[in-house]
Image (spheres, rainbow, N blue to C red):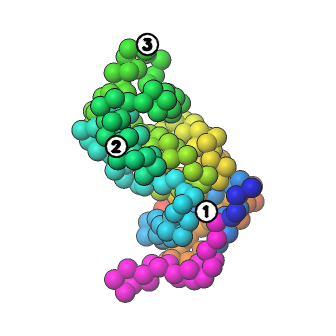
Amino acid sequence: MSAPLRLDQASLEHDGVAILRNISLTIRCGETVALVGASGAGKSSLLELLRQQHSDRVAWCPQAPGLVPMLSLYLNVYMGQLHQKSLWRNLKNLFFPCATHWQQVHDLARELGLLGQDDAQTQRQRMLQSAERFSGGEQQRISIARALFQQRPVFLGDEPVSALDEVQSRRVIERIKSHHRTSVLALHDVELALACCDRIVGLSDGQVVLDRASADLDSATLLALYPEQPHG
C-alpha cells in the first residue's frame, strides 16, 4: 500500500503575502478527497503544495488544460510520459508512434468519450486531429487523459471537470478513480463533491476549516463556505 500524502504545518507565501497558513493534512491511500471553498480560499495553492512535496507520486491535471494547440490529441496525451522516455524515443514517436503507446492513448481517449462510436478510421483521424480543433470540454478531457497516461498512484486535479455537464463530470471522475487509488480534486460543485468523493476538505482564507467524511455532510453545510452565494 502506498504511503499517505502528508502536510505538517505547511505554509505558502507569494510576494510576501501568506496564501496558506499552518496546513496539516493527511490524505490516506485509497481516498478520494474534494477540496471546496470560495475563489481565493486556497484550493489551488493546497494542490500545489501537495504536488511540490510529493512530485514523484502524483499525476497533475491543472485548471487550464495547457495543451499544445497544433499538436494532435495523441501527442498531447503522450506528453504525459515525456519525462520517462529518452530524447531519441520522444523524437521518433513524433513521426512514428509506437503501437503500444498509440493503443494506450486510444483506450484512454475512448474511455473519456473523445472518440465516440465512430469507425476505426474516423477514430484514427480524431487521434491525429490538432488539439485546437476540439471544444473546451474535449480539451479538458484531453488534459485528464494526459494526466492518466502518467500512470502515477495519486491524481491531483484543479477543477478538472469544470467545463463538463453534470453527467459527464460524474462519469469522468469515476474514470479517474478507476485509474488512481487516491485522488484529490478541487471542485466548485458541492453536489458533485458530495456524490463522488469520500471526504471533503473545506478551505477559507488559506486555512482548513472543515475536514469530514462526505456521508456526514450536506450541501447547505458546504455552501456556507461560499458567502457570495445565496443558500438556505
Q: Mark 2 or mark 1: which comes first in sequence?
A: 2
Report, in whole angstroms, how far the alpha carbon at label 3 lies from the one at label 1: 44 Å
Q: Amino acid at mark 2?
A: Trp
Q: Position of residue 69 (x, y in %)?
A: 26, 41
What residue is drawn where x is 67% and y is 69%?
Answer: 26
> In the rendered view, would you say 23 is above or below 40?
below
Q: Which mark is residue 119?
A: 3
Q: Mark 3 or mark 1: which comes first in sequence?
A: 3
Disc 1 designates what residue? 222
Tell me if residue 12 is in the magenta stretch. Answer: yes
Disc 2 crowd rating (10 Å Cα; few below 14, some 14-19, many 20+) is few
Q: Which mark is residue 38?
A: none
Q: Mark 2 or mark 3: which comes first in sequence?
A: 2
Q: Main secondary structure of the magenta part?
A: strand
Quarter of the image where the N terminus is located:
bottom right
Disc 1 crowd rating (10 Å Cα; few below 14, some 14-19, many 20+) is many
Q: In the structure shown, which secondary structural element does the residue marked by tag 1 occupy?
A: helix
Q: In the structure shown, which secondary structural element does the residue marked by tag 3 occupy?
A: loop
Disc 2 designates what residue? 88
Mark 2 or mark 1, which is nearer to you? 2
Tell me if residue 6 is in the magenta stretch. Answer: yes
Quarter of the image where the C terminus is located:
bottom right
Q: In the structure shown, which secondary structural element does the residue marked by tag 2 occupy?
A: helix
Q: Position of residue 31 (x, y in %)?
A: 69, 55
Magenta region: 5-24
Question: What is the residue that sits farthest to the bottom in this orientation?
Answer: 16
Query: Label 3 near label 2: C-beta < 8 Å?
Result: no
> In the rendered view, would you say 197 is above or below 24?
above
Q: Nearer the viewer, residue 113 or 2?
A: 2
Mark 2 or mark 3, which is nearer to you? 2
